[in-house]
Image (cartoon, rainbow, N blue to C red):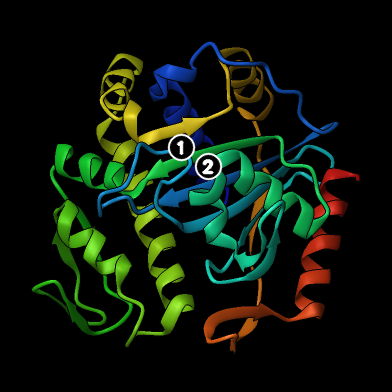
Amino acid sequence: MKQRLKKIILMITLLSVGGVLNLFGPSVSASGDASTFLIMGVDTADNIDTVGNEGAGRTDVMLLVTISDTSNRATVTSIPRDSYVEVPGHGTHKVNAAYPLGGSELSVQTVEQWLDIKIDYYVTVDMVAFRKVIDTLGGVTITPLATFELDGYAFEEGVPVTMDGEMALAYVRERNNSGGDYGRQERQRQLMSAVFDLVREEVTGVTQAIGLFQSLSEDLDTNLGLISLTRLFASYHDFNGEIEFHQLQGEGQYIDGVYFDVIDPTSLEEIKQLIKAETGE
């Protein structure tokens, strides 16, 4: 569990160092002794604008990460991409619609309003960036969680396979025949974890890390500035607590002919209280 937390911190660190456009961005104050991050993965493969901007692709991955000194624990909550929410200034939509409507900042505002929390930092990464990292580092080995075919690639449950970037993206994009959106979220978390491991194994020096992630600068958007990054890394460098994973639960419903994931009120309230307890709000 401790290693998983280190992976998350490392990835946030590397993403921020690589995001050269924001390297000397604003210093953001965390909430007391806890920090809350919204990590978003955006699939911009189809004629989409630069990551972070209005009009860009929808968020395929949304993870809310809270790290607390008080509880000596971190929590990661997966947010279903089709969650039925109120997007500030735009009415009700799927939560992933906030990104093309207003970029990273509107996505943050939407989740803040929905969960009644304060998000300190956001990191938005184009899923294409994962493809670039995987290809640069020579592929990633994953044991498929389901059997299916997509985009000319065949995956067999339980049989490890070394994937290049394109194959890995196909693995995490499928959502129709292998557990739906919840199954896809599980595979996305699996890929992200595998990429974290790959980076930790192959990228051994700061110079190498900066060089790799500078090449991804157009695929990243973050409000983490250098001062905030340094402070956060120093604060949590010796963190030895555990990490808990949570999932907002809902059921699929059609509203005005559109499919949504309507989150169960009990599940929503449990997550709200969990985050408030971690952040001391």
Name the one closer to the observer, 139 or 27.
27
Image quadrant for the C terminus?
A: top right
Q: Residue at x 69, y 24 (%)?
A: 235
Against 134, is 235 above or below? above
Image quadrant for the N terminus?
A: bottom right
Which numbered marker is on residue 222?
none
Tell me which amino acid carries mark 2: Gly
Badge 1 density bin: few <14, some 14–19, many ≥20, Cα 10 Å:
some
Q: Which residue is mark 2?
A: 103
Q: Which residue is mark 1?
A: 53
Say left or right for 19 vs 232: left
Secondary structure beneath disc 2?
A: helix
Against 151, is 113 above or below? above
Say left or right for 161 vs 226: left
Where, by quadrant of the figure, is residue 252 drawn? bottom right
Q: Residue at x 22, y 66 (%)?
A: 170
Secondary structure beneath disc 1?
A: loop
Q: Is residue 102 visible?
A: yes
